[in-house]
Image: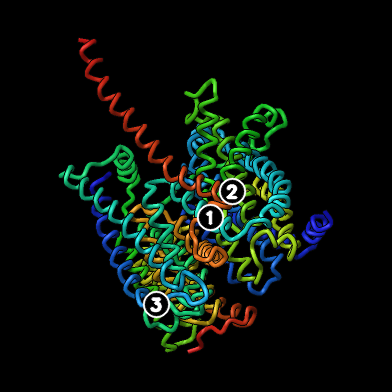
Amino acid sequence: MDPSIAKRDIGLMLFIIAACIAVLVESWDLPPGTFEPLGSGPVPQAIAFVIIGLCLIILLRALITLARHAAPTKTEEQLALEAEAAASGFHARPWSAVAVLAFSGLYVGILYLGLFGFGVVTTVFLLFIILFLLGAAPVRAFLSLITSFDRAHWPAAKPAVIAIVISVVMGFGCEFIFTEVFYVDLPTG
Amino acid sequence: MADFFAAFSNLFQIWPLTLLAIGVSLGIVVGAIPGLTATMLIALTLPLTFYMESVNAITLLVGMYVGGISGGLITATLLRMPGTPASIMTTFDGFPLARKGQPGRALGVGITSSFIGGLISWCFLAGLSPPLAKLALRFGPWEYFTMVLMALVMLASLAQGSMIKGLISGCLGMLFAMPGMDPSLGQMRLTFGFHDLDAGLKLLPVLIGAFAISQIIKDAVEIDWRPKMMSVSRRGIIVGFQDVKRHGINMLRSGCIGTWIGLLPGIGANIAAMMAYTTTKNLSKEPQKFGTGHEPGIVSAETANNSSIGGAMIPLITMGIPGSVVDAILLGALIIHNLQPGPLLFTTNPEVAYGFISSYLIANFIMFGLMLFAVVHIAKVMYIPKSYLLSAVLVFCVIGTFALGNRFFDVWVMLAFGLIGFGLEYCKVPLGPFVIGFVLSPIAEEHLRSALMMAEGNFLDVFNRPVAVVFLAVSALSLLWPLYQERLARRQREALAAAEPLCQNDSI
C-alpha cells in the first residue's frame, strides 16, 4: 500500500468509526420490538459494528504500512502520469475544489435566506464560478476591452463574454422554465 | 406476448420515440465528455421525469443509459481518456489505432461492436426476463434477504480495489438508509433530533450528491486540463459485413461475457469489458498485438461493455435487484413513479417491464445510427471548456434536488453527500457499493424482519430454504475468493523472489 494512501486511510477510518459510535449511542435506547423479534435498533447496530470491525482492519494495515515505509514511494503509473502532466504544462488546482464547495454553500445559503430571487442569485453565482474556474486572464482582458475598446483584447476576453451570456441565459432561463413549465416553486426573494 | 408487442407499438409513437432519441443523444454527448458520466446524467434527469408517464420516463432513462455507455468510446479512442469508466479497456487499442491514422476505423469498429453487443444482450433480456420473473415470484423473505446480501457481498468483493473498502462502502450506504421512521414499527430512529430526518434521507439528493457533486469537485481540481485536438474523418467508419463475420466469434463471446457480468448484481460495464478483453487476449494467437491498435481488443471491450447494460437490466426488472449503479438509479426511478420493482412488475405494470425491454432494443438502433453519422460532430463536444459545463451542471443539481420536495434540507443533504462521495473516492473507497447499499438496505431489512417474524425469531430457519442456502454459499465464496487469490498471488511472488537469486547464480 502507498504510504500516502495509508495516511488518508487512517484519517477516514477514524472519522467513520466516530460516526458509527454516534450511531450506536443514538440507537442504544431504541425499544425492542413488540410484534416482531428484531425491533428498530439491532439492524443499524449490527451494520455499525461490522463497519467498525472493517475499519479497524484497514487502520491496522495502514499503520503497518506506515511503520514499514518511512518515505512515500511512487508507483510507475504515478510517475508516468506526473511526467505526462509536466509535459502538457497542466497543473492540478486543489483549492478550486474547496472554492467550488464554498461558492455552492454560499449560493444555497443565499437562496435559503430568500434575500433575492432565484434568477438573480443564479446569474451572479454562475458568473462568479465560471470566471473563477476560467482564471484571471479572461477577466483582465475583458476589463481592458471595455475600458480601452481595443479589439486586440477580444480573443482573450471572449471566454468572459461567453460566461456573462451563459450566466444570464441560464439564470433567468432556468427560472422561467422551471417555474412556468415544470411548476417548481423556486425561491422568489 | 401481447404485452410485449403493445410495449413496442407504444414506443413507435412520436413522443416516446422522441424521448428515446433525446435520451440517446444526450447520453452520447455526456458520455463523450470526460468527467461527465451516464450516472450523473440519469441522476440529474430523474427529477424532470416526475412530470412524465412512468413508461416515458423509463424510455428516456434507458436511452441515456445506452447512449452514455456508448459515448465513452469517442474520448477513449481519440484522447486515450475514457469518457466513462466502461470504456477504459477501449483506450488500450482504440487510441493506438486512431494514432496510426485510422481514427474513423477505430470508431467504426467500436460503434459496430457496441451495437452488436447491445443486440446480443437484448436477446438474453427479452428471453430470460419473463421466466425469471415467474421464478422469482416463488421467492420468500429469506430468499430475498439472502439475495440482497449476496448482491452486496459480490459487489464489494468484485469491485476494483480493496474488498474491505468495498464492504465498508456498501455498509455505509446501508447505514445512511436507516434514519427516519422504521417501516415495520413506525419508530423514529437515528434522527439525532432533526425533524427533517423523520422521513429519512431521500434517494435523489444522495445520488446527485455522491455522483454529480463529487465529480464536479474532482473535475474542478483538474480544470486546467485541455485535451489535445485530433482531426477525425469518417473514412473507414462503416464496417463491412466481412469485418463483422471476421470478428463474429469474438463479438458473440464478449457479448455473452458482458451479459453474464451484467447479470451479477452490482458489477458494472467496466468489469465486463475488462474480463472480455482479457479472455480475448488469452485466447488470441497474437496476444502481443493487443495494446498496439489491434481491432479484436476494441471489439471485445466495446461489445462487452454495451452488452452488460442488457444483462444488468435482467435482475432489475425480474427481482428488483440493481445490476449496476445506473440500475440502482433506475430502481429509484421506478420507486419515485410509485411502481413496485420486482417480479410483480410483469403482472402489475407490464407496459413498464416490457417498456424496458423494447426501449433498450430501439435505443441500440438509434445509438448505432447517431454514432455512425454524427460521431465526427459529437467528438467536438469534448473540447468544450469544463468551466462552463461544470457550473451549469451544478445549478441543475440544485434545481433538481430542490424540485423533489421544495425543501432546502434536500439541497444541503446533496452538498453533504457530494463531500462524502469526494472524500470516499479520494481515499480509494469505491462509490458503487455505497449507492447500491443505500438502495438495497431497506429491502434487505424488510425481508429479514418478515422472515424472522415467520420463523418466530429463529435465524437458523434460513437453512430450511435451499435457494437461500445457495445464495448464502455464493456470498461466502465471493468473500473468500479474493482472499484465496491474494494468497495465491503472494505465493507466486515469493516463489519468483526465491527463484531470482538462483538464476543470478546460474548466470555467474
Amino acid, disc 3: Leu
Residue A176 in the image: x percent, y percent?
A: 59, 80
Cα distance between the residues tagged 1 and 2: 8 Å
Please tell me if label 1 and label 2 are on a single chain: yes
| Residue A30: mark in rendering | 3
Q: Quadrant of the C terminus of chain B?
A: top left
**Badge 2 sits on which subunit?**
B
- Residues packed near mark 2 inside 10 Å, few (<14), some (14 to 19) or many (20 plus): few
- Residue at the spot 37% in from the left edge and 74% down from the top edge: A27
Residue B176 in the image: x percent, y percent?
A: 43, 68
Which residue has dot 2 on it?
Answer: B466
- Residues packed near mark 3 inside 10 Å, few (<14), some (14 to 19) or many (20 plus): some
Q: Are marks 2 and 3 in contact (CB under 8 Å)?
A: no
Which residue has dot 1 on it?
Answer: B462
- Residue at the spot 24% in from the left edge and 51% down from the top edge: A60
Amino acid, disc 2: Pro
Observer-nearest residue: B173 or A20? Answer: A20
Residue B118 in the image: x percent, y percent?
A: 66, 45
Amino acid, disc 1: Val
In this view, the mark in front (2 or 3): 2
